[in-house]
Amino acid sequence: MSVLLQAISSRFCDSSKKIMLWLAEGLVQPRGKNESPEDVAERCLIKLIAQGMVQMTNKKPNGNVNSCRLPDALRQHWLSKAQQATFLQVQANTRSELSQSTGLIHHLADHLDKEDVSFDHIHGGYNIASTSLMPQYCLTNHLDKEGRKPGEDIGNFLHRCISSSFLLLVRVLDLENVFKPKLPRELGKITRLRYLGLRWTFPEMIPSSVSKLQNLQTLDLKHTSISTLPNSIWKMQQLRHLYLSESYLSKFMSQPQASFPTALQTLWGLLIDEETPVKDGLDKLIILS
C-alpha cells in the first residue's frame, strides 16, 4: 500500500490518470480472471480514501472519484517508508549532494529547476554515458511553462538517451504540459513503455515508430494538435486506453479482427458518424467502459 501512496502527488491529481500510471508501473495485479487491473486499482484508491490516507478533492457526476491528493505530511512519511523498503531511491536535490547518492533511480522528474541535479542532464549537453541518473521505470515532467526551449531540450535528451541505449527499460513517459516536445524518431525503441502521456503538449505529429510500442497500455494525446495517426496503431494488442485530440477528425475505419486492440477499454475523442462502420469496427469495442 505504501507503494501506491508514494505515487500519489501532494497536489491535485486526476484519479483515472493515476490508476493508469499504477498499472503501467505494475503496482497492482488482478487476483482472478473476472476482474480487470483497473478494477483492482480503483478499489485500492477507494480504500485509501476510506481510511483517510488520501483526500478526495472532486467527484464525477456518477459519484466516482474524479481527483484526489495526498497531504504533504503523509507523503513524506510514505516516501521514507518506500525508501527503507528499497523500492525508491530518493535522488539528491542539488548538484553538491549528487556524489552522496547511490543505487538505481526508478523515477526521474524534471521540474525545470537549475538547482536540481537532473537539470544539466535534461536541458544541457551532459554526457549521458557518465551519469547514474537514468530512470529504470518512470520519467515525468512537472512543467507549466510555454516556450520552445523545454520541448526541444526534452526531445534532445530522449534522443541522446535512446541513441546510447539508455531509457530502454522505462515503462512510463509522461510529458504533460511540456509545450511541443520534440519527440525523437527512435521513440519506438523504448519497447517496454506502457504509458505515453502527451496531454496538453500541443505537438502536431507523433513519430510513426509509436506503433512499435507493443507493450503500450495507455496513449494519451488529449489536448494536442495531432490530427493523424499511423494506421498501424490499431495493431497494438496491449493498448487499453486511447485518448485522442479534439483535432483528430479522421473517421473510424474498418479494422480486420486480427489487428484490432481487443483489450481497448477507453476510446476518447474519435469522430463517430452515420458512416462509421459497425462490422469490423464498433462491434469490436466490446469492453469499452
Image: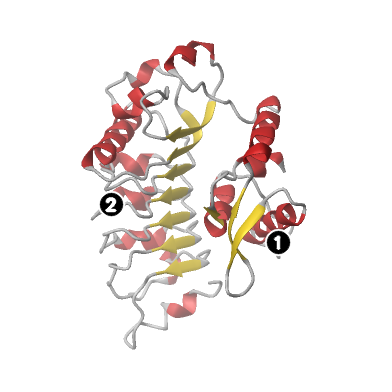
Q: Secondary structure at mark 1?
A: loop
Task: Please tell me how crowded label 1 is: few (under 14), some (14-19), or many (20+) other residues with Cα within 10 Å.
Answer: few
State the residue in front, 220 or 262. Answer: 220
Callout 2 amino acid:
Ser
Residue 193, compared with residue 124, is above or below; it is below
Question: What scheme was used to colour the molecule?
Answer: secondary structure
Left or right of 180 on screen, residue 26: right
Instruction: Give percent across and percent down for residue 170.
Output: 47, 37
Which residue sits at x=34%, y=84%?
273
Q: 163 left or right of 25?
A: left
Pointer 1 residue: 33
- Closer to the camera, 99 or 229? 99
130 lies above or below 111: above
For the C terminus, the quadrant is bottom right
How many numbered marks, from 0 up?
A: 2
Looking at the image, is mark 1 or mark 2 earlier in the sequence?
1
Tag on residue 104?
Answer: none
Task: From the image, tell me which residue sits under label 2.
Answer: 208
Residue at screen point 40% across, 23% down: 115
- Residues under numbered marks 1 and 2 in contact, where contact means CB atoms less than 8 Å apart: no
Say which residue appears at 31% left-offset and 63% top-offset.
231
Give me the C-alpha separation between circle 1 and circle 2.
34 Å
Amino acid type assigned to the residue bearing label 1 in the image: Lys
Question: How many C-alpha atoms fall within 10 Å of the one at disc 2: few (<14), some, or many (≥20)?
Answer: some
Quadrant (top left, top right, bottom left, bottom right) of the N terminus: top right
Measured as percent of width and height from the top left, residue 149 is found at 24, 37
Secondary structure at badge 2 equals helix
**Farthest right residue?**
51
Where 93 falls versus 31 (above or below)? Answer: above
Residue 53 at x, y percent in the picture: 72, 48
